[in-house]
Amino acid sequence: MLCWTNVINAQQITFSKVFSNFQLNPENGVVIKETNDGYLLLSFSSCLDNNNESCCALTKLDQYGSIEWFKQYPFHQGSNTLVVHSDLIYVAGHTNEPNSRYTLYCIDSLGEVVWNKVYGDSTKNSQFPRLALWGDKWVLCGGQDRNINNHRAQILYFVVTDFDGEQINEFYYGEDDLATLAVKSIVSTQGDCISSFVYCPSGCFLDLKAGVVAFDTSGILQWELDLPFSYNPYECVLAQIDSNTLAIKWFVDNTTIPNHDLTPPAIFLTDMSGNVLDTVVFQNQTLKEVRNMEPVWESGLVGCGHEYPNYINLSNPKLFGWLFRMDENREVLWERSYLDSTYQGRTFGLLYVIPTSDGGYLATGTITNYMTGVWESHNWLLKLDSMGCLEPGCSNVNYITETEEAVFLKGKDIKIYPNPASDYVQVEFPADFDIGQNAYAVLVSNTGSIVRQEKINASKSQLNLSGITSGMYYLMIRRGNEIIGSKRIVVHQ
């Protein structure tokens, strides 16, 4: 188990970063991990050749959030699927074939594939495995399809491998339920594989439940915990926060308190045998949701998700990224909500958060932008200090107005200048860049309207600004269906 201890008096770096592979398909940051020299970000992505397949996008960042390298791999990863161990990177997911199977990739520190293996019956659909290091083995826990009354119904499917990816064992859980979906797997300090999941006992209509199960290294069930019914379809996540305690997020029934959520999110604190010791309920009128929790070892936990701070007072409330910190006494120390207004779009919230070795926190999620005429979807990174602040002394609700411009990973070395501009804007590509036959410079107003478009035929091209009124615009570099560059520019006439 990798646990960071807060570094007292260390300088805590903070930033808000936005970057993406390309815009026409969503790309969502789902897992962030710290390495000894920076961070690794795992994100959902569509493959670069636009063949409608899903790819795993992996980005190496330095401690300031700047991109060192970016790689894509031809499989569909889920959340909670990235582990860094002995200077190697391990990522689990499933293949893109019609009957998908589990896959496990071993990747070196430069993003090159060392090996990859597949697991599961090719006549069945095995999807979205979660990955955990289990002593000297790996365990993948996801779902495998069954046919019940001519309907697909998943059962929890576990695959255990050695360090070289060779399968050792497999086992199942959830045969009595209609459908079961894995959410997160961890390995406890006692050596058990503990997995959380959501399931439908019967009809999958209003009978959504959640549970947690623990298995020993032979795949023998040690204990199970059943959690209440809920109307909310979100995750049941878990974390071990000290040697004796598990924190499990699910929902509690709250139908008796007016003007509050029917099933507000709650954290169930249990012992290491799944016996509930205490419950912390996020009683609220703002529709908060916890998407992930990570331990601050023996000092509580940090969590993230989303909320609507102005849900009751506004007819069209905005979704914010939400973080909270709970101490070892089960008291919530602070809550922070963030919305990046730079792109005048919206966020899907924050999907993953970790404590960092400098005593701060790093969270990732998604920011969307509608200003360029297409629905852009970017990875969003927030590096915060020990109080969850981007700037010291922040409030509970924070609007970010100066996030750096989105970095497009395929075109991050394209230069666009001058800025501000009056007569023209110069677009300059690296000498070895493949421009292709269908590249355009597109000037878009701050209302999303295209005001000028010119084809790019050379590594250095100019967009004429004559007749363009003063104001703020976006200059997009489009190649076929891809947008490989975008920069806000100010025109002064």
Image: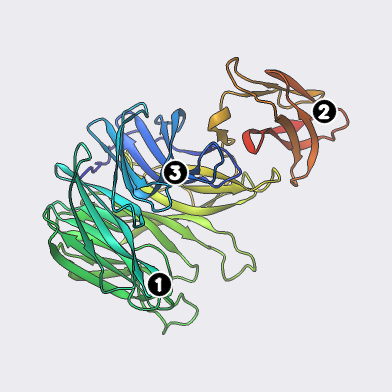
Question: For mark 1, what is the residue?
Answer: 150
Vertical side of 382 occupied by 411: above or below? above
User: Callout 1: 10 Å neighbours few (<14), some, many (20+)?
Assistant: few
Question: 402 and 181: which one is in front?
Answer: 181
The answer to whether residue 444 shows anywhere in this view is: yes
| Location of residue 364 in the rendering, given as x and y in whole percent from the top left corner | 44, 46
Which disc, if any, is residue 43? 3
Label located before the other in sequence (2 or 1): 1
Decide if residue 322 is on the left or right side of residue 9: right
| Location of residue 289 in the rendering, given as x and y in whole percent from the top left corner | 43, 63
Label located before the other in sequence (1 or 3): 3
Q: Residue at x 12, y 61 (%)?
A: 220
Which quadrant holds residue 192? bottom left
Question: 419 and 215: which one is in front?
Answer: 215
Three-letter code, disc 3: Ser
Decide if residue 221 is on the left or right side of residue 429: left
Three-letter code, disc 2: Leu
Three-letter code, disc 1: Asn
| Location of residue 57 in the rendering, given as x and y in whole percent from the top left corner | 44, 39
Which disc, if any, is residue 465? 2
Assign the N terminus to one quadrant of the image.
top left
